[in-house]
Amino acid sequence: MDERERIQHLRRIKVIVTEIFMFISVICLVVFLTLVVTGYSFNLKKLGGQGEVIERTGLIQISSLPTGATITIDGGIPLLLRTNASRALGVGEHEILLSREGYGEWKKTVSLKEGMMYRVNYPRLFLEEREAEKVTTLEGLSATSVAPNMEKMIALANGKFYLYSLNETKSTIEALEVLNGDKVVEKIESFEEIEWGGNSERLLAKINGKYGVLSVKKTAEVVFLDEIWKELKVSKVRLESEAGDKLIVLDEAGELREIDLKSKKISEVLLKGVLGFDNDGEDVVYIRKRSDEEMKAKAEDEEETEKSRYTLEAYQIGAEESYLIAELSDEKPKISTMKYFNDNLCAVVSGGKIEVYASEEWPGEDFEMEKVFEGEIGFEAKELLKRGKGMAFSIRGVNGEELVYDVEAEKMIKVELSTTNGWVDEFLRFELGEEGEMSVVDYDGLNKRKLVEKGVNGKQKIVVSGNNKWLYYFKGETLTRERII
């Protein structure tokens, strides 16, 4: 073989080796990308050590107020990553620590499942250096309520309403004259069972013992329901629309109707035999008692002999039929419904346990709610509430016990707080000590932080303003605030 042939032969070998190498590289890249896409990661720290180098992962999204907090995971070196951010982590428990200069820390241990996206979208950090500032004093203060957007607070003092703008650098206060038609409501004796519309322009409440809808958009106008439906005997009433101009009303006869406040019209009976309901806008879940005729017809069908007299059903205002969610053994369960991202959720506390159902679609031809959780609560339930903007259901017992079902973590959490406690916003709670010292904790009872040394009035609202800058609370009858970011 001469020199020329030898060179050509070597070139052919190089081409073959290069092609083999490229082929193997492509295969490795495809395998790597497939593993990444399907939720696996490579932990190079475990090379030559204990544990698997290739591990299944989940995705965690971390936000904070204020943003830009440093993220530390599992006690390691603080990441360059700042909130708000996402990161893939191995399956199992991870300790998340958020910190920022001048602020207190926030910490939580989360448990990730394979392919799961875990949202931590509620951590709130507080300035360590804060000063209390007096806003105003209201003599005869008896009730307060805060709008969903946390931009307004309404207070009742000495028979008059006062409206506060909470976002302002200098908090503004406005005395409200309440009109019922052309007449002035001279004195407001009581203000109870308050529910705001989603746009924070109207609220439903018992005012002077009567259900009415109060507008705080321009002038304070109230429409009492007994003026529209004079013989109405209310069992339960809820707002239907974001604007607060439509209501869903259940009367003592078990008939469900809709009231349009603009036209002041009452609909025909939408549902009969209703024992209780909850709604998220037009989407309604309700408990129904089957009639004797229905039970007799069921008994004649061998497959239906075990069916209960009570059912949990779903209905949408304007639809023609209802859809069965579950059979119930208890005629007075606690129910609550809410939306969580793309899912419609319904929780039921009945017979000493909680069941949670979910569906992406609301009543329609192929509607079905799947049971996604079931667990024992271990006490007699007094109320079931939705919290955390669809992130949790809170179950309170008759003796003050409390459990929280965490929708994101899909588990029950026991919450132990002092007797005097409540909610600051959708995710943050407060508890008071014997001398009115105030601490805040997350919705699940974690991250307890003391904010006020003493003197806080736990009977009135404690709230963070809608722009997240101010913490408002009462000391006696004095409205006080602190700058928190």
Image (cartoon, rainbow, N blue to C red):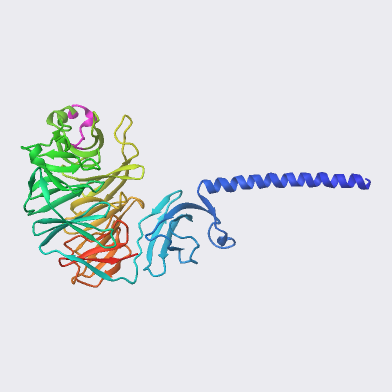
Q: Residue at x 10, y 49 (%)?
A: 207
- Left or right: 270 in relation to 126: left
The residue stretch that appears in magenta: 298-311
Image: 252 above or below 133: above
Is residue 388 or residue 224 the one in the foreground?
A: 224
On the image, the x and y values in percent for residue 29 come to 62, 47
Image: 323 above or below 409: above
Q: Residue at x 14, y 33 (%)?
A: 265
Give the quarter of the figure containing the N terminus.
top right
Give the quarter of the figure containing the C terminus.
bottom left
Is residue 459 or residue 409 the one in the foreground?
A: 459
Is residue 124 or residue 366 the one in the foreground?
A: 124
Residue 310 part of the magenta-drawn span: yes
On the image, the x and y values in percent for residue 175 come to 15, 56
Q: Residue at x 11, y 41 (%)?
A: 225
Kindly tell me whether residue 416 is visible in this rendering.
no
Tell me where residue 4 sits by quadrant: top right
- Left or right: 269 in relation to 102: left
On the image, the x and y values in percent for residue 370 come to 32, 40
Kindly tell me whether residue 214 is visible in this rendering.
yes
Is residue 380 or residue 454 the one in the foreground?
A: 454
Residue 274 part of the magenta-drawn span: no
Q: Residue at x 22, y 29 (%)?
A: 302
- Left or right: 111 in relation to 17: left
Say how many tags the image has: 0
Tell me where residue 276 sits by quadrant: top left
